[in-house]
Image (cartoon, helix red, strand yellow):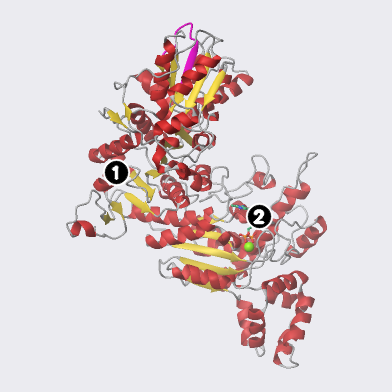
């Protein structure tokens, strides 16, 4: 590297250290606070250990096609860097961690400064880079995808992040998929939140990454240290460093030059070359030397990055010092430690930043013109910010099936199969994935038609050997199904990455994942993470509820509908019938491509133009299908979340509202109650999530003075007399629908499942949990006025 480039990088590193620490200081010590405000936080120490790595990467190594997940606590460094490049405002930095300010952890959706991947829940931001790389490879194999230079998907990870199990699930999955173009740069500061990491962790890391086919590059010593090792006595110093326990190294770092000298003299002082080596340096110089680890040396870092001339996945173990260059350096309690005002004043003097110039981008830089010129030609920033878009793929309209008795899960498989046969633009963009439940969630026929994806062609041995099988497992670059191992977190991370393809790579993908519904919870944090990044995908949870009866109690999903309701960025549906499913799937393929402004729809009070991800909770229970309905009102009702399956009369005494697969129970009960109660209504709820969201939104709008705001559910329930009893029923937690009673103040009986663990037939379990027709009739009998209703089923 040219000497003036190195000089500029070092000046920049100091600048970023200053701006990051100042941003945190300002938020904590200077910004006006209200009584009761807690500390804002901001992690100056974690920032300090990352400045050298980020300087080297962003201003030397990266190219615009590269994508980076920056570890959560390096957020102030990231924002400072973007501030220098004109992509972040001073106002937002001054308001760091405040309302509308730069985010605590880099956020794709909330920050304005070109964040590639959000981070925050440690471990997930690391693994998403591997799945982004797989997505990039998937696109590269498709003739319709524009050829772009392939980027490196890079994670800046904390060493304690490697405690997260999802990292290892990802390593294994990556190995299976021939992962490449992925770098994980580990900030090996040997500190976590609570303390110091175990000795020798690096050996485990090397062994584990090596086992999964990764190269590991250990960056332990900086250029100053390496030069010192060449001096007479240098070998003794190097041996001492290698022997030194993490705790002691940290403690001496915190104590500074004099402490280093005393310790080193007592341990390697020889009245000869080692002593002379130490004596040639002042205390400050000795401290700088001992702090010059590989990960705090831009020269070492840039060289190591430049040396990678292959696309194998690579982990860099960059030795750093938590709190590097600040008075917090090395202290085991420094994770959320902040410089005091006095320490900051001293730090400011040392950094040479004049009072009043704190936010000046290039204040205290020796040659600001040279640095500005250097920044202006940084390749990574040369094309501006890198948010791409991709045109919407039109949806063909619902694919209706003609089935007499069928389950929604089987219907889902058939609809996908029909789409595959259509060879439409939409079908071309669909990529399916499943964590080892492809066949058992009915993706089999889609996969048989579209094939499995792999970078190289792999034949199906069973087929080659002429062994009959219903599944054709042919792998090729043209394949459209990515088969995953069982780890559900990987599923959601792949959906998360593929669902950002339009934005990351400028090519639209329509990812569809399937999983057994109870295991949505296993990947929940990754699902939440994908939604937080505004990723677009369809997740199908099937089979679900206690209806998966013989599968066993451990597999029953009870709370899943509440997950669907409460997860932001995810529209959840639970259709009962195939015509509903057809309408929902067609809508979903469009909804996941929307990116409009957030004006609310005055019909539903939902903000549908913004789009989002979709969750379909399906079932293996085959239901007798009604005569197919596809009129506009039906379609609208299904998408808005509910429609009257049986319209209530003017004197309605009982309404049964159901969601999903218990439709036959609701219908049977309505028939049995109908003789003894007047004008029974049956409300088919297809999405408690959307109904509820619209209702909440309309309430908020009325509070803000928009008196006429009325949500879909309010309009549906408007004609119901006040005395009408509302019975809700779902194969899931009863709270999913119990709120319906509050819409117009009706007395409600919520039937559903609160316990799990029983095996049995569907009717055993419906009876056991009280969600069968008898339970609905009994509720009507007990709680509505009128003559007794016959409790026995009419057979
Ligand atoms: C899933 C999750 N659990 C816990 C936390 C809280 N947390 C934030 S940072 C941190 C320790 C991070 O240590 P490391 O990755 O080594 O980074 P460093 O602070 O050393 O820079 C923890 C436990 C979190 N953000 N996410
Ligand atoms: Mg750490």
The residue located at (54%, 16%) in the rendering is 782
The residue located at (50%, 47%) in the rendering is 522
Label 2 packing within 10 angstroms: few (<14), some (14-19), many (20+): many
Residue 695 image-quadrant placement: top right
- Regarding residue 645, the answer to whether it shows in the image is yes
| Rendered location of residue 711, percent (x, y) | 52, 20
Left or right: 11 in relation to 344:
left
Callout 2 secondary element: loop
The residue located at (39%, 40%) in the rendering is 550
Q: Residue furthest left?
A: 466
Label 2 within 8 A of ligand 1 by Cβ: no
> What mark, if any, has residue 523 been given in the picture?
none
Callout 1 secondary element: helix
Magenta-colored span: 646-657
First-in-chain label (1 vs 2): 2
Residue carrying label 2:
361
Label 1 packing within 10 angstroms: few (<14), some (14-19), many (20+): some
Who is closer to the viewer here, 204 or 555? 555
Left or right: 735 in relation to 793:
right
Indicate whether residue 387 is drawn in magenta.
no
Residue carrying label 1:
428
Who is closer to the viewer here, 593 or 439? 439
Who is closer to the viewer here, 21 or 334? 334
The residue located at (23%, 48%) in the rendering is 470
Which of discs 1 and 2 lies nearer the camera? The answer is 1
Q: Residue furthest right?
A: 342
Q: Is residue 724 above or below residue 439?
A: above
Classify the position of ligand 1 by quadrant: top left, top right, bottom left or bottom right: bottom right
| Rendered location of residue 21, percent (x, y) | 70, 56
- Regarding residue 302, the answer to whether it shows in the image is no
Left or right: 408 in relation to 185:
left
Q: CA distance from mark 1 to mark 2?
A: 47 Å
């Amino acid at each position: 590297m040219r000497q003036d480039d190195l000089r500029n990088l070092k000046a920049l590193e100091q600048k970023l250290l200053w701006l990051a620490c100042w941003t945190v200081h300002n938020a904590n010590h200077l910004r006006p606070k209200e009584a009761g405000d807690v500390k804002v936080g901001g992690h100056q120490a974690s920032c300090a250990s990352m400045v050298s790595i980020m300087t080297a990467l962003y201003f030397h190594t990266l190219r615009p096609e590269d994508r980076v997940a920056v570890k959560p606590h390096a957020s102030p460094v990231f924002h400072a860097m973007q501030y220098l490049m004109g992509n972040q405002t001073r106002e937002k930095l001054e308001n760091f961690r405040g309302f509308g300010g730069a985010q605590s952890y880099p956020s794709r959706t909330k920050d304005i400064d070109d964040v590639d991947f959000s981070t925050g829940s440690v471990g997930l931001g690391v693994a998403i880079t591997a799945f982004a790389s797989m997505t990039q490879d998937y696109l590269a194999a498709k003739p319709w995808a524009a050829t772009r230079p392939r980027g490196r998907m890079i994670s800046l990870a904390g060493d304690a992040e490697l405690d997260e199990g999802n990292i290892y699930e990802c390593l294994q999955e990556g190995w299976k998929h021939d992962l490449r173009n992925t770098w994980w740069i580990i900030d090996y500061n040997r500190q976590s939140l609570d303390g110091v990491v175990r000795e020798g962790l690096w050996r485990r890391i090397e062994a584990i990454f090596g086992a999964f086919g990764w190269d590991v590059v250990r960056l332990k010593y900086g250029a100053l240290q390496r030069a010192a090792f060449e001096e007479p006595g240098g070998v003794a110093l190097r041996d001492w460093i290698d022997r030194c326990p993490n705790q002691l190294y940290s403690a001496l770092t915190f104590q500074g030059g004099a402490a280093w000298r005393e310790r080193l003299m007592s341990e390697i002082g020889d009245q000869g070359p080692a002593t002379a080596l130490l004596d040639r340096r002042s205390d400050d110089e000795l401290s700088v030397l001992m702090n010059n680890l590989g990960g705090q040396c831009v020269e070492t870092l840039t060289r190591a990055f430049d040396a990678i001339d292959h696309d194998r996945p690579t982990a860099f173990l960059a030795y750093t010092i938590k709190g590097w260059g600040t008075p917090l350096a090395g202290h085991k309690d420094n994770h959320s430690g902040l410089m005091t005002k006095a320490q900051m004043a001293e730090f400011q003097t040392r950094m040479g930043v004049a009072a009043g110039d704190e936010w000046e981008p290039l204040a205290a830089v020796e040659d600001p013109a040279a640095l500005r010129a250097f920044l202006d030609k940084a390749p990574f920033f040369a094309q501006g910010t890198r948010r791409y878009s991709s045109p919407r793929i039109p949806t063909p309209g619902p694919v209706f099936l003609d089935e007499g008795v069928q389950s929604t899960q089987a219907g889902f498989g058939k609809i996908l199969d029909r789409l595959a046969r259509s060879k439409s633009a939409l079908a071309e963009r669909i990529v399916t994935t499943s964590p080892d439940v492809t066949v058992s969630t009915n993706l089999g026929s889609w996969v048989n038609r579209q094939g499995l994806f792999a970078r190289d062609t792999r034949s199906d041995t069973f087929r080659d050997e002429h062994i009959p099988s219903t599944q054709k497992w042919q792998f090729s670059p043209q394949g459209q199904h990515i088969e995953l191992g069982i780890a559900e977190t990987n599923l959601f991370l792949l959906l998360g990455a593929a669902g950002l393809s339009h934005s990351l790579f400028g090519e639209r993908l329509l990812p569809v994942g399937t999983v057994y519904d109870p295991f949505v919870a296993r990947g929940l944090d990754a699902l939440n993470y994908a939604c937080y990044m505004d990723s677009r995908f369809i997740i199908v949870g099937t089979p679900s509820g206690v209806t998966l009866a013989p599968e066993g109690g451990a597999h029953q999903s009870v709370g899943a509908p509440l997950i669907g309701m409460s997860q932001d960025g995810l529209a959840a549906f639970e259709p009962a019938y195939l015509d509903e499913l057809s309408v929902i799937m067609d809508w979903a393929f469009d909804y996941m491509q929307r990116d409009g402004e957030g004006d609310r729809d005055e019909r539903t009070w939902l903000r549908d133009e913004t789009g989002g991800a979709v969750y379909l909770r399906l079932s293996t229970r085959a239901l007798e299908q009604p005569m197919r309905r596809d009129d506009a009102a039906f379609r609208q009702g299904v998408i808005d979340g509910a429609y009257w399956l049986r319209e209530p009369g003017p004197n309605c005494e009982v309404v049964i509202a159901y969601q999903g697969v218990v439709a036959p129970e609701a219908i049977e009960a309505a028939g049995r109650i109908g003789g003894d109660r007047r004008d029974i209504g049956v409300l088919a709820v297809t999405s408690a999530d959307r109904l509820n969201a619209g209702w909440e939104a309309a309430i908020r709008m009325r509070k803000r003075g928009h008196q006429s705001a009325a949500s879909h559910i309010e309009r549906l329930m408007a004609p119901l007399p006040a005395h009408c009893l509302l019975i809700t029923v779902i194969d899931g937690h009863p709270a999913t629908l119990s709120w319906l009673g509050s819409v117009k103040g009706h007395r409600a009986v919520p039937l559903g499942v609160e316990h799990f663990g029983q095996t049995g037939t569907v009717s055993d379990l419906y009876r056991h949990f009280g969600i069968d027709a008898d339970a609905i009739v009994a509720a009507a009998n007990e709680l509505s006025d009128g003559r007794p209703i016959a409790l026995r089923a009419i057979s």
